[in-house]
Image: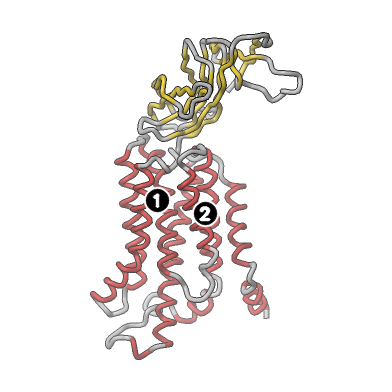
């Protein structure tokens, strides 16, 4: 009686959405840092469990098709599911597997959203998030009608690449295209392995392997698209993230703390913590705090760009290197300075060596006038 009620509740149309947002909520509460070992072990366990559930789903779908069309099963074919899982177990578990898949996808996508948004700027990375949203929408249709195995494998490829893109730099302490490509190859291999396991033990030999490769091609295609995105700088530069950034009249260090000087705002501008409007010719300091995992040693750049009044495009004036050592909770702090800044719009992009944008600081330079004098604020981080 209780089992019947549970199955009836799970059959409600709103349940997939509930399980999806359940995964999102769970990760939002439990996740802390991108380099925390326990968090990454949990996400890795999700990937392994998800792969197993996709194998289960695919083999169950093949068994259902074989039962509906026994004449299509080749001579000598073996049971599709029973060779791995007993039939009673399959019949009992099958109603719950789609919801488990939905929950894990929700958990993984929410984790990646948290981690990637920390490293993303609203520039070229919008394309990556567009793809993420499109696949999230596709995920909502996984349980309507027959199982779409190719869609499942495509989504699995996305979550594998998204995990390895930041986890391998955390593990190795290196941010390099070779590290990303290694993660892409491993992800494609995982997708193909899952596809082969779905068709393993069917007794159909080469035909089963060909069918498995065809099923895995969409997932491999997703990996290929993400590789293109990476070299177009459309993927956020995880695990780096901008913790704090602003423009100041002066930056000094005293007893391990930084004193940042900026113009006092009007009485109602209580939120003002930097020179969004900069008066005078300079010097202008760009101060940033960049989070990086403990083992990561890399170089980032302050890319200063200027657009004069009435201009259409920004032009590069300086690109100044700044070494970063990882591990500090508040981020690795540093600043660069430009001695003279012309009137107009300015922006300083915090970039990796490859030009991936970690964050952006924008400000406008105006002629010196009757502005309020600068005041000092101590930032302890």
Among all residues in the image, which is located at the extreme left?
A: 206
Q: Is residue 260 visible?
A: no
Left or right of 267? Residue 177 is left
Q: Quadrant of the N terminus?
A: bottom right
Position of residue 193 measured from the top left corner of the image (x, y, whole percent): 33, 63
Q: Are marks 2 and 1 in contact (CB under 8 Å)?
A: no
Tell me residue 358's x, y (percent).
47, 33
Instruction: Quarter of the image for the C terminus: give it.
Output: top right
Q: Position of residue 51 (x, y in %)?
A: 42, 62
The residue that label 2 is drawn on is 133
What residue is shown at x 60% (from left), y 9% (from top)?
Answer: 368
Q: Residue at x 68, y 15 (%)?
A: 264
How far is disc 2 from disc 1 in space, using C-alphas? 16 Å
Q: Please, is residue 199 above or below residue 349 in the view?
A: below
Mark linked to residue 71: none
Residue drawn at (36%, 82%), measured in percent from left and top? 79
Within-10-Å neighbours for mark 1: few <14, some 14–19, many 20+: many
**Can you name the residue that lies furthest to the bottom here?**
71
Q: Is residue 36 visible?
A: yes
- Could you say which is closer to the camera, residue 236 or residue 333? 236
Give the secondary structure at mark 2: helix
264 versus 235 height, above or below: above
Residue drawn at the location 62% of the way across and 76% of the way down:
7
x then y, percent, for residue 323: 40, 23
- Taking depth in this image into account, of 157 and 277 the one nearest to the observer is 277
- Disc on the earlier residue, 2 or 1: 2
Q: Is disc 1 placed on a helix, strand or loop?
A: helix
Q: Which residue is mark 1?
A: 161
**For residue 190, which quarter of the picture?**
bottom left
Is 204 left or right of 290, judged from the image as shown? left
């Amino acid at each position: 009686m209780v089992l019947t009620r549970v199955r009836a509740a799970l059959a409600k149309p709103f349940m997939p959405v509930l399980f999806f947002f359940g995964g999102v909520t769970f990760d939002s509460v439990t996740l802390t840092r991108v380099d925390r070992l326990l968090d990454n072990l949990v996400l890795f366990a999700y990937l392994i469990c998800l792969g197993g559930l996709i194998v289960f789903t695919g083999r169950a779908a093949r068994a259902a098709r074989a039962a509906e069309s026994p004449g299509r099963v080749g001579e000598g074919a073996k049971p599709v599911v029973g060779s791995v899982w007993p039939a009673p177990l399959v019949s009992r578990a099958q109603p719950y597997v789609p919801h488990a898949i939905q929950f894990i996808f929700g958990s993984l996508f929410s984790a990646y959203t948290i981690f990637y948004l920390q490293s993303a700027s609203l520039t070229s990375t919008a394309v990556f998030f567009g793809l993420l949203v499109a696949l999230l929408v596709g995920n909502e249709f996984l349980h309507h009608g027959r199982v779409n195995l190719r869609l499942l494998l495509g989504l699995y490829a996305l979550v594998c690449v998204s995990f390895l893109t930041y986890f391998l730099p955390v593990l190795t302490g290196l941010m390099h295209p070779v590290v990303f490509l290694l993660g892409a190859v491993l992800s494609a291999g995982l997708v193909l392995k899952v596809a082969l396991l779905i068709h393993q033990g069917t007794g159909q030999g080469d035909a089963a392997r060909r069918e498995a490769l065809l099923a895995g091609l969409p997932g491999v295609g997703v990996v290929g698209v993400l590789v293109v995105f990476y070299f177009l700088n459309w993927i956020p530069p995880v695990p780096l993230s901008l913790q704090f950034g602003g423009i100041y009249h002066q930056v000094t260090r005293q007893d391990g703390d930084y004193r940042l000087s900026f113009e006092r705002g009007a009485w109602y501008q209580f939120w003002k913590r930097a020179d969004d409007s900069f008066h005078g010719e300079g010097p202008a300091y760009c101060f940033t705090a960049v989070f990086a995992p403990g083992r990561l040693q890399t170089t980032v750049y302050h890319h200063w760009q200027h657009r004069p009044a009435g201009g259409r495009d920004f032009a590069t004036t300086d690109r100044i290197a700044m070494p970063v050592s990882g591990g500090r909770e508040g981020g690795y702090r540093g600043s660069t300075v430009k001695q003279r800044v012309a009137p107009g719009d300015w922006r300083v992009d915090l970039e990796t060596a490859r030009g991936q944008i970690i964050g952006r600081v924008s400000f406008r330079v105006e002629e010196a006038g009757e502005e309020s004098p600068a005041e000092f604020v101590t930032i302890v981080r």
